[in-house]
Image (cartoon, rainbow, N blue to C red):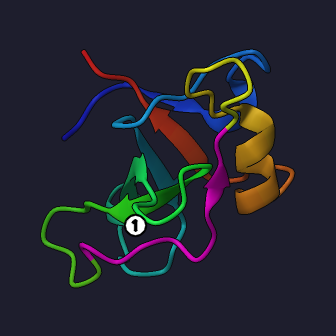
Amino acid sequence: MNGPLLPLNEVPEDFNFQIGMRLRVYHIGRAVNTEDDFYEYLITYLPWQSDAAILVNVTPGSAKAGFTYTGSVAIDRSNGGVKITKSAFRHTLGSELLHWFLVIEE
């Protein structure tokens, strides 16, 4: 599950996040080695709410795998499609998006 990482605060404002993309957050306090001190999340639909997505922990070997992040992320369906914006992530993850990265699929 390793791919290049792009800090979320460097992702362009008009970037459209998609269902199935992965995010990684570092400095969570679960490992001494900072390279291993992360959780990885998959952006997925919230089954009972069509205008929201959730982040599901998919960290290999983690006891928290399958757990969801505490907040949902708004989906904009105003143009008939699915659009998840950087602004929506700021609302859920914090305005600075500190320690959050987009995992680039190769």
Image-quadrant location for residue 40:
bottom left
Dot 1 amino acid type: Asp
Residue 38 is covered by the magenta coloring: no
For label 1, the residue is 37
Residue at screen point 73% across, 16% down:
12
Image-quadrant location for residue 36:
bottom left
In magenta, the rendered stretch is 65-75
**Residue 44: image x %, image y %?**
39, 49
The answer to whether residue 45 is above or below residue 72 is above
Say left or right for 46 vs 13.
left
Residue at screen point 26% across, 73% down:
66
| One can see residue 81 in this view | yes
**Main SS class of the magenta portion in the image:** loop
Residue 70 is covered by the magenta coloring: yes
**Residue 49: image x %, image y %?**
54, 61
The N terminus, quarter of image:
top left
